[in-house]
Image (cartoon, rainbow, N blue to C red):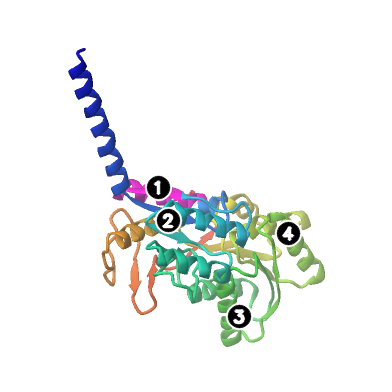
Amino acid sequence: MTRLMKTLTAGLLAAVAISSAAIAQDKVRVAFVPQIQGIPYYVAMENGGKKAAEAFGVDYIQQGPTTTNAADQLRIFESFVNQGVNVVAVSPDDVETLKPAIAKARAQGIHVITSDADAAGSEREFYVAQAMDKDLGYTILDEMVKRIGKDGKVAIISDAPTIASLNAWIAAIKERAASEYPDLKIGSVDHTDGTASRAFQFATDAMTRNPDLGGIIGIASTTCPGIGQAVEAAGKQGQIVTTGFCSPNTIKDYMLSGALTYSVLWNPSDLGYLTVWAGKQLADGKAFDASPKVEGLDANVQWLADQKILLLGNPMIFTKENIEQFDF
């Protein structure tokens, strides 16, 4: 090969490399920071997000803390901002911790949205909601009352007390009880550290303290396995009604054994898909229609402009009869 040919070849390769880098840079980058990394619920969201990323030509990254730790989540959020991604979506562990970081990201030209849980009062641009808080709280309590009656006794076990979405669901449950079931007795709310072992302890304690306990509601998906384990250990399958906002794969064995009675949730894979699609629309400067048509997603999506909420749809109810039809 002559020197001239070598020079031309080297120049061509350099041009190709520069062109490839430019193309990669032109690709919208969307990052999502969940409340906790690795649980089936957020794995399903990641799978949905990756599917949307492939469909719409997006680079998608998902990383969260190993426990529901606000400081660790903040560091991950700030890392994505420092990388200069186009859009950061976050499901806040603690809204107050994130507020300054969200404002700083926006000031740097980074788009910030919330998904799965909101950050009310922050500078996020909109919230990708799985279902309305009121609908979730009302549905899970209505289903409980159908099974234990209007004057039963219920215990509630939640995750960290700083997680706004979980607190909103608890508030909706209590509101529904006050307006529709005034004789229903709701005990104090116990908060875990995001582990099944703590949920097991609280569920066991609730059953021990209240021999007449009718039901247990797990507010976070992380609480559901511990509740199921506690009921099995106490030998109370079928004697106590248990539920939560639980992904099917997390609780399938407990539901089939009778340790968990039903679950209220949505399809987190669809939520991840919608989040990435919404991030791409935002980065491209495209507004939402009132009823957006999202290619590849079979859901009744609604844009609530006055609330800045992109709504996936209504809650789903999972029981022993239908749980094996779902894989997330």
Q: Secondary structure at mark 3?
A: helix
Point out which mark residue 50 bears. Answer: 1
Q: Secondary structure at mark 1?
A: helix
Residue at the spot of label 4? 198
Quadrant holding the N terminus: top left
Along the polypeptide, which appears first: circle 4 or circle 2?
Answer: 4
Report the front residue among 285 and 138: 285
Q: CA distance from mark 4 to mark 2?
A: 28 Å
Tell me whether the residue at label 3 lies in contact with that at label 1, contact meaning CB atoms closer than 8 angstroms.
Answer: no
Local packing at callout 4 (Cα closer than 10 Å; few below 14, some 14-19, many 20+) is many
Q: Secondary structure at mark 4?
A: helix
Residue at the spot of label 3? 174
Q: Where residue 93 sits: x, y (%)? A: 58, 64
Tell me whether the residue at label 4 lies in contact with that at label 2, contact meaning CB atoms closer than 8 angstroms.
Answer: no
Residue at the spot of label 2? 272
Circle 2: residue type: Gly
289 falls in the magenta region: no
Q: Where residue 13 sits: x, y (%)? A: 25, 28
Q: CA distance from mark 4 to mark 1?
A: 32 Å
55 falls in the magenta region: yes
Q: Which residues are magenta?
A: 43-61
Q: Secondary structure at mark 2?
A: helix
Q: Residue furthest top?
A: 1
Q: Is residue 46 left or right of residue 37?
A: left
Say which of marks 3 and 4 sits in front.
4
Say which of marks 3 and 1 sits in front.
1
Q: Relative to 249, does residue 291 appear above or below in the rendering?
A: below
Tell me whether the residue at label 1 lies in contact with that at label 2, contact meaning CB atoms closer than 8 angstroms.
Answer: yes
